[in-house]
Image (spheres, rainbow, N blue to C red):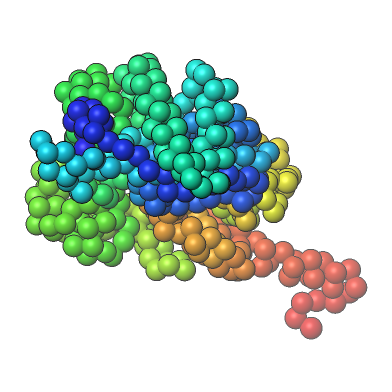
Amino acid sequence: MPLQEQLSLWNDMAVKVLDVQRENLLPGSDIRRYDIPANMLFFACSGHGKLLVDGISHTINPFFVCHAGKEAAIDLVSVAEPIEYIAIYYKAELIPSGEREHDSEISLLQIPFGFSPAKRLSLHQVMEQIASKWSMRQGMEGFHANALLQGLLYDLLKQQLTIGYQTPSEAVGIVTTYIDAHYHKPIRLDLLAELVHCSSRQLQRWFNQQLELGPMEYVIKVRMNHAAQLLQHTGATIQEIAQSIGYRDMYYFSRAFKNYYGTAPLDFRRASQSDAEVIKHAKGELRLQQPPKRIAVLDVQYADQLFTLNEFPAGSVGIGGGDICCFPDFLQNRLGQFTVLGTCEQVNMEAVAALAPDLIICTDLHEQLYSKLSQLAPTLMFHRNEDWRKILVIFGVITGKRQRAAKYCWSTVRRPQNCLACLLRSCGASMSR
């Protein structure tokens, strides 16, 4: 429900605490893709890290507070030191009124926000008080916890609505980040405006100023770009592609695609695959229309093989267990020329996404990440112990340097024979004997 419509209902609303959790998140024990079961108020007592709410990133510092609605997807990452936090789960309900029938379907306070509040110490005290009252839950303590939470939410919402967003570019950035992460789900203009607490007309104006297209036009652009990639690089059916980008009706998707690209999806696929390179890998086949320009490699052996072809990855992982420990010499000398993507064992998915690669190359070690990687860019997966010569030949095809790859592989085959020939000649023998 849009924020402006909710305001008129808040006078008849009551909140009920469902659970209070006090936790310490240690570095390396990150929380990934947790769909919260109820509205949540998050407060960081200490520590530093990053919190993502439905793809929108917040930097965690001491006294940072964040609110998220029921079923929001949460990612919580600790950086260098533990994060001590309090999470209050609650529900908000309308009090039945004779003037209005109670609607159990209304979802209240589904408002995402995150900031460092002005009165940090007083907020900390109230959060501690709620946690203490909840831990007792005897007599009037539970009632008191509910009352404290309702007052706290009032203060935070009032401050958030007063602060708003400083610039249109910040608001547009938040909305585009949300669209990029949720393009495959139903998206409405009023819900996008709700993310940045403005009217639909205002958001439309900001988008036109910043991007020269409207919010829903941006949604179509993102969906059509993903559809084009799937048509070019996979054998998915039109129905599968339509559903994967947020269209329930295959025919409606086909019309939308033709309006955007000027050709039907199947005709687009036939035209794009006529001159495509077909690369076989552990997950099937991938069609490439042209040599990629921004390759992300998730194993240093692939960076080495690209260097052999005089190609440079846009991003590469390093060697190590958790955090990056080191790079091989051939990468160490070029640290300023590529983006660090974590380690082979612990890939930094945010860094990969920010790199915006047009091809990702990984190993079967990244089996569980393959689906997410494929959403970022066309992805090749090879067995980690694959013959390096086979991989080098494939890389020659990918980069348009077949002859260079073949010549190098041939030279490694001939080199031992040449050494043996020299040894035999020095001993007065020949290769034919």
Q: Position of residue 243 (x, y in %)?
A: 22, 58
Placement of 314 over or under 236, stated as above or below:
above
Check the picture and name the quadrant holding the C terminus: bottom right
Position of 54 with respect to 218 (left or right) is right
Residue 234 falls in which quadrant of the image?
bottom left
Q: In this rendering, does residue 181 appear at all?
A: no
Viewer-proximal residue among 109 and 139:
139
Residue at 56 percent across and 28 percent down: it is: 124
Could you tell me residue 372's position as x and y percent? Answer: 43, 54
Image position of 51 (left or right of 171): right
Q: Nearer the viewer, residue 172 or 21?
A: 21
**Residue drawn at 51 percent across, 37 percent down:** 130
Residue located farthest toward the front when viewing the structure as drawn:
139
Q: Quadrant of residue 196?
A: top left
Q: Residue at x 13, y 58 (%)?
A: 250
Residue 105, position as x, y percentages in the image: 20, 48
- Indicate the quadrant containing the N terminus: top left, top right, bottom left or bottom right: top left
Between 277 and 152, the one lying in front of the other is 152
- What residue appears at the point 71 percent right and 40 percent down from the top-left corner? 332
**x, y percentage for residue 14?**
31, 38
What is the number of callouts on the image?
0
- Pick out the residue farthest to the right: 427
Q: Is residue 366 visible?
A: yes
Q: Residue furthest bottom?
A: 433
